[in-house]
Image (cartoon, rainbow, N blue to C red):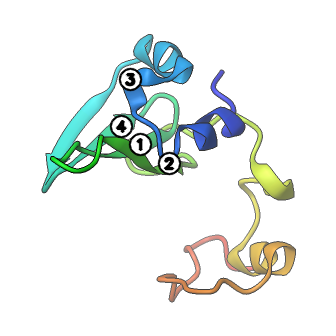
Amino acid sequence: MITYDELVGLLGSPLKDSEVFEKLSAHNCEHDSYHGRIYHSYQQLGICLLEFLPTVSQPGYIASVSIYSAVHKYRQYAGVLPHGLNWGQSYTEIQKLLGEPFRSSCTKLIPGNQH
């Protein structure tokens, strides 16, 4: 099991230089490249990592970690969610728990999860 804290610990670091990489290597991964970025999709784990590729002035690093519920081609992430979150909460419940986001692209509630 890869914990949330281990995933957060990847941020800003090269993926292959991490101990977590060894755990991830035991699982199937789809890699998609797009404009200097690689998306590492571990669908069976419910995890996707966004890696910025190295440039002349900067080494490559993990820029984003996404964890998924059972959606699209992903299984639900089985680790413990942070900050008291759980997969059954609505957007409104999450806002009450964490507060209003500084910025959000969410304009609609997820169908079937409108409490």
- Going by the numbered disc 3, the residue's amino acid type is Lys
Of 4 and 114, nearer the camera is 4
Which numbered tag is attached to residue 68? none
Residue 58 percent coordinates (x, y): 28, 48
- Dots 1, 2 in contact, CB < 8 A: yes
- Dots 4, 3 in contact, CB < 8 A: no
Which numbered tag is attached to residue 41? 4
Q: CA distance from mark 1 to mark 2?
A: 5 Å
Mark 1 burial class by Cα count in 10 Å: few <14, some 14-19, many 20+: many
At horizontal 54% and vertical 83% (from top left) the residue drawn is 104
- Dots 1, 3 in contact, CB < 8 A: no
Q: Nearer the viewer, mark 4 or mark 3?
A: 3
Query: Above or below — where is 20 with respect to 46?
Result: above
Question: Of the residues under marks 2 and 4, which one precedes in the sequence?
Answer: 4
Q: Classify mark 3: helix, strand or loop.
A: helix
Q: Which residue is mark 1?
A: 49
Q: CA distance from mark 4 to mark 3?
A: 15 Å
Q: Is residue 2 left or right of residue 100?
A: left
Q: Which residue is mark 2?
A: 65
Q: Classify mark 1: helix, strand or loop.
A: strand
Q: How many numbered dots are placed on residues in this image? A: 4
Q: Nearer the viewer, mark 1 or mark 4?
A: 1
- Going by the numbered disc 4, the residue's amino acid type is Ser
Question: Of the residues under marks 1 and 4, which one precedes in the sequence?
Answer: 4
Residue 100 percent coordinates (x, y): 73, 86
Q: Classify mark 2: helix, strand or loop.
A: strand
Q: CA distance from mark 1 to mark 4?
A: 7 Å
- Dots 2, 3 in contact, CB < 8 A: no
Question: Of the residues under marks 1 and 2, which one precedes in the sequence?
Answer: 1
Q: Which residue is mark 3?
A: 16
